[in-house]
């Protein structure tokens, strides 16, 4: 994967995390041959972990909301 392709992958990943829509996530996984979350609960946890731990492209307010959601629901931030 070239640097340009990697940057595109990061941009698409960030868009999926921001949208939080399963349909966007599913398209991303299919495009990049990534195994999908086994169920909606795992998907929701994963989206919040991405938002909480990625500083690039994710609005700070969204990061903070996801951190709170993870902690309030008994999950670790990392």
Image (tube, rainbow, N blue to C red):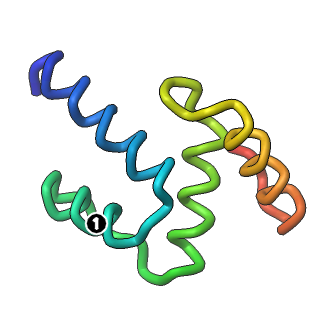
Considering only vertical position in the picture, is 61 above or below 36?
above
Picture coordinates of residue 60, whole percent (x, y): 69, 31
Q: At which x and y percent is residue 22?
A: 40, 71
Q: Position of residue 41 (x, y in %)?
A: 59, 79
Q: Disc 1 on helix, strand or loop? A: loop
From this view, report whether residue 39 is shown above or below residue 51: below
The answer to which of 17 and 42 lies nearer the viewer is: 17
Q: Is residue 21 left or right of residue 44?
A: left
Q: Residue furthest top?
A: 3
- The structure residue drawn at horizontal position 55% and vertical position 73%, both measured from the top left corner, is 42
Q: Quadrant of the C terminus?
A: top right
Displayed quadrant of residue 69: bottom right
Residue 34 shown left or right of residue 45 in the figure: left
**Which class describes the residues within 10 Å of circle 1: few (<14), some (14-19), or many (20+)?**
few
- Residue shown at the point (77%, 49%) measured from the top left: 65
Question: Is the N terminus in the top left, top right, bottom left or bottom right quadrant?
Answer: top left
Residue plotted at (21% across, 30% down): 8
Question: Based on the displayed image, in which of its 4 quarters is residue 25 positioned?
Answer: bottom left
Observer-nearest of 73 and 23: 23
Q: Residue furthest bottom?
A: 39
Q: For mark 1, what is the residue?
A: 35
Q: Report whether 62 appears left or right of 11.
A: right
Q: Residue furthest right?
A: 72
From the viewer's perspective, tell me whether residue 3 is left or right of residue 61: left
Which residue is drawn at the image coordinates 56% and 34% (left, top)?
58
């Amino acid at each position: 994967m070239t640097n340009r392709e990697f940057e595109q992958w990061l941009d698409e990943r960030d868009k999926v995390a921001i949208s939080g829509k399963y349909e966007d996530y599913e398209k991303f996984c299919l495009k990049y041959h990534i195994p999908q979350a086994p169920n909606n609960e795992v998907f929701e946890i994963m989206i919040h972990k991405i938002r909480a731990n990625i500083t690039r492209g994710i609005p700070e307010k969204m990061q903070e909301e996801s951190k709170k959601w993870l902690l309030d629901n008994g999950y670790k931030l990392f």
